[in-house]
Image: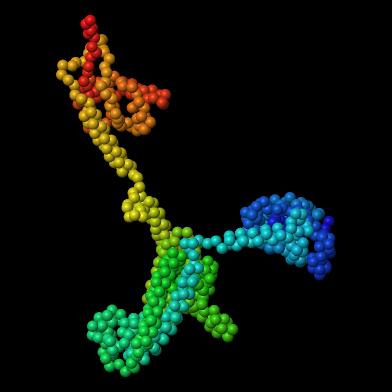
Amino acid sequence: MAQQMFVLFEHASGYGLFKVREFEEVGTFLPEVEASSSDVSKFKQVVKLVGYRAFTSAASSLENINAISEGLITDELSAFLETNLPKVGKKAGIILGVTDPKLGAAINEKLSIPVTHIGVIPEVVRGIRTHLTHFVKGLTNSSMKQTELGLGHSYSRGKVKFNVNRVDNMIIQSIALVDQLDKDVNTFAMRIKEWYSYHFPELAKLVTDNYKYALCANFIKDRHTLSQESVPKLEEFVMDSAVAQAIFDASRMSMGMDISPIDVMNIERFAKRVIGLSKYRQQLSEYLKAKMSAVAPNLATLIGDVVGARLISHAGSLINLAKYPASTVQILGAEKALFRAIKTRSNTPKYGLIFHSSFISRAGPTNKGRISRYLANKCSIACRIDCFTENLTSVFGERLREQVEDRLNFYTTGDIPKKNEEVMSEALADHTAQVNLKETEGEAEKCKPEKAFNGEVVQEDTSASKRKRDRKKLKKESLASAEVKAEVEEQVPPATEGESEPATGTKKKKKKNKHIAEEEQPQENGGTNEQEEEDELEPPKKKKKVQKELNGSVEEEEAALALKSPKKKKKKKQEGSGVVEEQMNTSIESPKKKKKKKSAVVAN
């Protein structure tokens, strides 16, 4: 039996499986297939829809399209193919057409289905894409465009995600700006030298540095105003007392022409601009150094900040530089010389951008090619470590730099350096130790005092500090309770002499002369305002009690006072809660003035 051809079509809305009728004859008439792809009626005679699986959500669509772009087969696609494709038998076979060879290889490996992507498949897929709305019911051109646009935006956003802390785009822009500033500052410095030399030509020979020349021109202005008192200030600019004195002497006998005040003003403005650009260039260098330490510390330690940044900029990104072999890193930046050497069949260049490294200049003429090849090998290792390591340190860069130094020493003295395996093992141990140390320091910093916005130090609670605060709190409560006791004793009048306690068998009712207006009673659970109001509304009791819970010295005071006053046990009922709490507390009864009821009979 002849083979059956099926075509897999991936769209933003879902997967489609189409069957090609009489594909052996179709393959022989490829021009006819190309012509029929523009006509719907003719194309439907060639292709028939077998099955269509729509994506359930935008997230599912994005997940499937990411897998297809990487040449992977998802579970959803695998289930769709197994459901709609006929089973492969011994007599009857099938062949599946796809557009991506990587996806076809993954399908063949997982499902054992013969796959092809050549021949008539591209034309059939083009026709399916053109007439998809005629095969799938409910799918319109507007909905198709909207789905494709949404998936395209989601796919693009997923591809451009990056880590903010390890961004190499800032390094590329910074090194480009540094190179541009160097050119501009040199051009402006030449212009200001030519301009100011009309008035003071001897200054250009005495001060050769562009930045120092701009400082001197801005300070001197008119050479006739220069005096002996200005020499110390000039010495600060040129950093040499002899040169400062020579400038003053040359101003006395200069051959320059006189200059008008308006010309002096314009020269001063231009000199200030040159000084400002030079200062900004220094700040940009510091910024570039900090970014290189954060993004590629090992490469910066090995070859320097500027050369490392130029390598990353020339490669396009740190990932691209890490993918390059060492031979490409060696001649990176010398592409013109390489192609010229290939064209003329002459010697190829030995180095490119790494020529600006100090190692190349320190090597002898016969060893420059060797050390450049060795240095490119170490640079390739360093940038791969920086690109694919999560916890970055400069340990590997330092060890790789030591290896290059040992190799230079080997070329001159013949001392055999250490093997690469030993050096990398030591570097890996040091790297692990530094990472563990940073982790422990990070945990320790959490326990350290932190500064608030107003400058006050905020310290986290510890067990010792908590116990100390508890003791202070109890002490304050004890002092407050002692003050309440003193106030209560002052309000209660002293007892009169001659009055005595009645016998227990013949207890008589006692009356209070007045009620105490407010009564504070500290409790552990803290009383509410409602409870205090309820206590005030309660009827007068037989005796007024003051309950206290003191610790330490307050308890001793209670014991001393208890010897003078009798002790009684009482029950306290709280109104409104419905719960009776029996509290057996020591009540301190202050002596009160007692009155007895008169029982005498009024004489008639």
Residue 287 visible in the displayed image: yes
As displayed, is residue 178 above or below residue 155? below
Q: Quadrant of residue 259?
A: bottom left
The structure residue drawn at horizontal position 73% and vertical position 60%, both measured from the top left corner, is: 141
Q: Quadrant of residue 159?
A: bottom right
As displayed, is residue 39 above or below residue 439? below
Question: Quick one: 150 or 115, which is closer to the camera?
Answer: 150
The structure residue drawn at horizontal position 48% and vertical position 63%, both measured from the top left corner, is: 166
Instruction: Give the farthest residue toward the top.
Output: 604
Q: Position of residue 366 (x, y in %)?
A: 44, 81
Count of labels in the image: 0
User: In this rendering, would 499 be left or right of 452?
Assistant: left
Q: Position of residue 252 (x, y in %)?
A: 27, 91
The N terminus: image quadrant = bottom right
Residue 525 visible in the displayed image: no
User: How did the renderer colour the structure?
Assistant: rainbow
The structure residue drawn at horizontal position 38% and vertical position 72%, both measured from the top left corner, is: 415
Instruction: Give the farthest residue toward the front.
Output: 604
